[in-house]
Image (cartoon, helix red, strand yellow):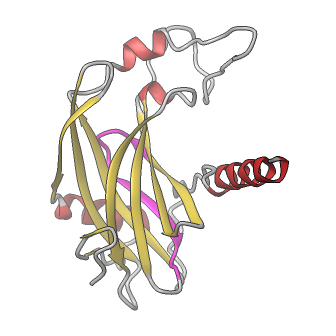
Amino acid sequence: MKIKHRILISAFLLSLVLSLPLFGADQDYRAPRDKEVVLVMKVIVAPEIEDDFYSRYWDISGKVLKSKRDRSTEPGETVPSTASLLIGSSVWNMEELALSELGTTATVKTSIPKDRNISLNVVSVYPADLGIFMVRFPVLAELTVPEGDNYIYVGTFVYEREGFQFKLNNISRLDEFDEAQAIVSERYGSGARLIRVPLRQQGNGE
């Protein structure tokens, strides 16, 4: 029994390490290397999250749990909600890519797996950028990075929800390619060519 418990604990700790946020949003927008790809996407939650509410009442403290905001803010300051994308090339190779504020186009860089297949697992939404409170919405899609391409347009994911419990009613994906291409050109230079690739349901292959 003790050995079994040790195995379970080790597996749990390993899963935590593998899913640690590796926030890699391109602040300086350096061009990707040959083995890197820039994923371009936007996340919208509708209706919009009440940032002001979460910014004012974010504090959680007690004998067991204490929390601090991820970024320094002034009391009462409204902080925009953010999102990140959990991706992987296999169940044992996952990383969390920092996106940006909800409703804005994000360009995030990651390594291209050997098989060139990337799984888009879930979008993690942080109301008022709270690290202590996260809501995860499914993506559950896969894409293949074509040879010679380093800028992939994923699309705009719209999550329609209701209530403070974030009941998910509908998921849709919009195509805002022209807007995304303009942003990529501005950030990475006029030679940065954005392309669309098919998204397929996870596990379906090609």
Q: Position of residue 5 (x, y in %)?
A: 77, 47
Taking the spot 42% from the left edge, 27% from the top edge, the residue there is 127
The quarter of the picture where the C terminus appears is bottom left
Q: Image check: 118 left or right of 199?
A: right
Residue furthest to the front in view is 1
Vertical comparison of 164 with 33: above or below: above
Vertical comparison of 115 with 166: above or below: below
Camera-side residue of 7 and 2: 2
Taking the spot 51% from the left edge, 75% from the top edge, the residue there is 32
Q: Image check: 92 left or right of 170?
A: right
Residue 112 among magenta residues: yes
Taking the spot 45% from the left edge, 25% from the top edge, the residue there is 128
Q: Image check: 148 left or right of 92?
A: left
Residue furthest to the right in view is 2
Vertical comparison of 171 with 174: above or below: above
Q: Which residues are magenta?
A: 100-113
| One can see residue 144 in this view | yes
Q: Position of residue 151 (x, y in %)?
A: 37, 74
| One can see residue 190 in this view | no
